[in-house]
Amino acid sequence: MPIIPSLYKPPILFRNAHVATIYSGVLRKVNSLLQQRERLELADGDFLDLDWSFATIPTTQVAILIHGLEGNAQRPYITGSAKQFIAHGIDVCAINLRGCSGETNRLFRSYHSGATEDLEAVINLILTKKSYSHIYLKGFSLGGNLILKYLGEARTVPRQVKAAVAISVPCNLYNSLVELLKPKNIVYSQRFKKHLKEKLRLKQLVFPNRITDKDIANINTLKDFDDIYTSRAHGFKDALDYYQKCSSLQFLTNITVPTLIINAKNDSFLGKQCYPYKEAQLNKAIHFEVPNYGGHVGFYGQKNITYTEKRALKFIEELH
């Protein structure tokens, strides 16, 4: 598909990438959303906690939402999206990835950017135990990468999966890591590292023979975390092997489900290789939009509804 021209023009203050990112991630409040938790027991003995929200009238449509790194289903970008979907007659299943629901997951492994088997398990649950004919996927950052990888891998995507929307996607994980480790992003990278190390200490209590104090002390950057934990826990040789195998960029040419990708031009988390212009032009299923502004999962909008929340609904509605 040709690259989609963007109509997003926020107020001047929110044209600053860091203002947009921090407001959305820390300051924005979304109230009055009811969530009903369901625990999905996984085949490997672990679990996923799913937070459901329902439209006021029965519907055959559901949106699966996936958060980003160290997020959860209570983050405002998830709850804001859920409110808009249910207001338009679409139920919502917001996934808390392993270890992100407020309770440590059972296994040594947890979640990562390419763990598509967990998304597949949620879709299978919906297909076997629910009565939805239309499934939409929407992911943010890491969650967006996961969705794109799922859609482009060598699998038959169920016909009920009608559309996908991916926001602020690090399509090339290594390229995004390089950006995150730059001084401009030190506030974000330090925050991520702090939260990840805290979770690793909880893992250490359960698996003391697999994580040592020295391991944790050696984590000085996000790449160190992926070398010391992510790669070992999930079967990769090292961090670089993980980034290479799980980056969604290589899977985009195989996607056949209509998919909207929105990456802001001023997203400080994304390097040049995270903008799949060529892949979008070669694949009619991919619609790629690059607003000048928005930061990382920012996209401030009036009445506490972000541009991407409105845009996702419009994209889905246009497919009908």
Image (cartoon, rainbow, N blue to C red):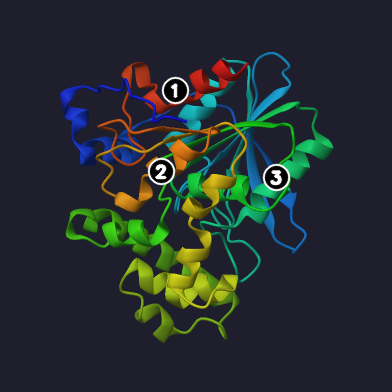
Which residue matches tag 3?
122
106 left or right, relative to 186: right
Q: Do the residues labelled 1 and 2 touch (CB within 8 Å)?
A: no
200 left or right, relative to 207: left
Q: In the rendered image of this protein, does residue 34 appear above or below residue 265?
A: above
26 left or right, relative to 63: left
Is residue 306 something one can see in this rendering?
Answer: no
Locate residue 131: give its quadrant: top right
- Callout 2: SS: helix
* Relative image position of residue 222 (x, y in whole percent): 36, 66
Q: What is the number of the mark on residue 278?
A: 2
Q: Distance between the residues labelled 3 and 2?
A: 31 Å
* Relative image position of residue 115 (x, y in whole percent): 59, 57
Depth order, front residue of 191/316: 316
Q: Residue at x 40, y 50 (%)?
A: 170
Which residue matches tag 1?
311
Q: Which residue is drawn at 45% across and 77% down?
A: 228
Locate residue 305: give its quadrant: top left
Depth order, front residue of 257/63: 257
Q: What residue type is labelled 3?
A: Val
Q: Which is more N-terminal, label 1 or label 3?
A: 3
Q: What is the number of the mark on residue 87?
A: none
Depth order, front residue of 283/13: 283
Count residues near mark 1 (Cα–Cα under 10 Å), then give few for <14, some for 14-19, many for 20+: some
Q: Distance between the residues labelled 1 and 2?
A: 22 Å
